[in-house]
Amino acid sequence: MTTDPPSPDPTLDYNALAQHIRRWGMELGFQQVGIAGTQLDEDEAYLMKWLQAGHHGEMDYMERHGTQRSRPAELVPGTLRVISVRMDYWPNQAQAPDDVLQDASLAYLSRYALGRDYHKLIRKRLQQLATKIESLTGPFGYRAFTDSAPVLEKALAQQAGLGWIGKHTNLINERHGSWFFIGELYTNLPLPPDAPAENHCGSCRSCIDVCPTRAIIAPYTLDARLCISYLTIELRDAIPEALRPLIGNRIYGCDDCQLVCPWNRFAGPTAEDDFQPRHGLDSSELVRLFGWSIDEFASNTRGSAIHRIGYDCWLRNVAVGLGNAPTSTEVIAALRTREAHDSALVREHVVWALRQHGVDRD
C-alpha cells in the first residue's frame, strides 16, 4: 500500500471492476481469482491457539507480528479487500513421485521446488494486475504478497472462494486439487467479496494416515516440529535423531499428504515453463547431490526456492537421505568425504548416517 493512498472513487461500478479483475487475472496466467473480506476472527483464534501450543517450532516469525497476520488492515492500513489468486504448479515433465520415493538411492524434492522460485513470478504478475486495475480506477492503495509477509494467506484464499483448508492444512480446490501457489493483492477498493469455499474433506483421513512422521496430529492440526517440510526447510539446527529414519529420501520438503489426496485426481499440469524441473532435480541420485561443492550448490539452486536453506542444511538433508539409502561402497565413500566438514551440523549428520550403515568413526 502506498503512503496515504487515494480514497476509492465512490462513483465506480465495483461489480464490473471485479469482473475485469477476474478476466485480467486469467490473462496474466492465474488459474483463479477471488475477492475476500478481512474478517478472520475464527482463523485468528485458531492461529493463537496453535502458536500457544508451540506447534510452530522455531518459526518465530509466525508470532513476531502479533495480529498483523490475521488483521490485514493492521499490516497494510486502509485495506478493505484482498484479491486472492491461484496458480497451478504441478510439473508434468517431472519423474513420477512414487518412482522416486520408492528408490531409496534417489533424492525426493517437493514438486513445488523443482523449477524456478515462484515468489518473484507471482509478485510480478500481481503488480501487472494492479497496473491494469489502475488503468480504470486511477491511483489506488495496494500491496502484493506471495508467502512473503505476515499474511494468513490460506484463510484469505478460502474466504475468496479459491478452496478450503484440508485436514493436512493445505488449500484444496474441488476442481483442481492442491498443487497450486497462492498470492494476494491487499487493496483499499470496496470490491464485492466472493462466497467462501465449503469444506469437502468429509470422513477422508488419507493425509493423516500417510504422513511418515505423524505430523498431522488431528484433523486440521499440523505440528510443524514433526513435519518433514519443516525439518528439511525451516529448521536450521540438527534434525531430531528419532525422526531421521522416517524422512527416508525426502531431502527438501514432503508431498505425501498431497500425493494421496483424492482431490488431486482433478489437478492439471502447470502452464508455466518456469515450474518445470531444472538440473535433473526430479530424480537425482543422492550421492551426486552430496558431491556438490558450495559453488555447484549456488549455481544449481540459483533462482530456486531451494537456495534459501543454504549449503550446510542441504548437506545435512542429503546426509540423512544417504543414511536411509541401501548400504553400498558408493554411499559410504560419499559420506566419508564429509566426515571432516567445517560445519558441526554436517559432521553430526554424516556420523549418524555412517552409523546407519554399520560404520563407526575411526
Image (spheres, helix red, strand yellow):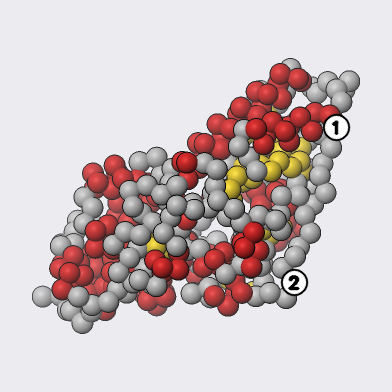
Nearer to the camera, 165 or 48: 165
Image location of residue 223, percent across then percent down: 56, 68
Q: Label 1 to label 2, Cα distance in Å?
A: 34 Å
Question: Label 1 amino acid?
Answer: Asn
> Who's the residue at 45% across and 52% down the image?
93
The front one of 93 and 7 is 93
Is residue 245 placed above or below 88 in the rendered structure? Answer: below
Question: Where does label 1 land, which residue?
Answer: 15
Quadrant (top left, top right, bottom left, bottom right) of the C terminus: bottom left
The answer to whether any part of residue 305 appears in the image is no
Q: Which residue is mark 2?
A: 202
Per the image, label 1 sits on a secondary structure element best described as: helix
On the question of residue 359 being in view, the answer is: yes
Amino acid bearing label 2: Gly
Image location (x, y in percent) of residue 216: 58, 71
Q: Position of residue 157 (x, y in %)?
A: 70, 49
Is 228 situated left or right of 123 in this image? left
* Quadrant where the image shows the N terminus: top right
In the image, taking residue 182 as reference, residue 110 lies left or right, namely left
Which circle marks residue 139 in the picture? none
Residue drawn at the location 62% of the way across and 33% of the way down: 28
